[in-house]
Image: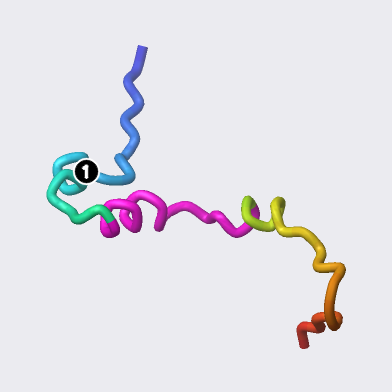
Amino acid sequence: MSIIQQPTLFDIQILQELEIEAKYQEIFSPLELTPLVALFQKENTVGAPVTIN
């Protein structure tokens, strides 16, 4: 049986040394969250229509 090694996203020791804001940035920066956020966006039914050119 072979062992598969995957690279880590971040080093735990580095995270312990960072400030709290930098920790969150380091953890979430490699993730693409746009599709997830789009799932929870709702249509605005009040106000002028928004057009994107």
The magenta region covers 21-35
Mark 1, secondary structure of its residue: loop
Q: Is residue 53 left or right of residue 31?
A: right
38 w.r.t. 2: above or below? below
The secondary structure making up most of the magenta span is helix
In x, y percent, where is residue 36?
63, 51
Which is nearer the eye, 45 or 2? 45
Confirm whether the magenta stretch covers residue 29.
yes
Classify the position of the N terminus by image quarter.
Answer: top left
In x, y percent, where is residue 13?
14, 42
In x, y percent, where is residue 47?
83, 79
What residue is shown at x 27% (from left), y 46% (from top)?
10
In x, y percent, where is residue 37?
63, 55
Which is nearer the eye, 20 or 53? 20
Render colour scheme: rainbow
41 w.r.t. 15: above or below? below
What residue is shown at x 47% (from left), y 52% (from top)?
31
How many numbered marks are there? 1
Q: Is residue 33 left or right of residue 1?
A: right
Report which residue position mark 1 lands on. Answer: 11
Classify the position of the C terminus by image quarter.
Answer: bottom right
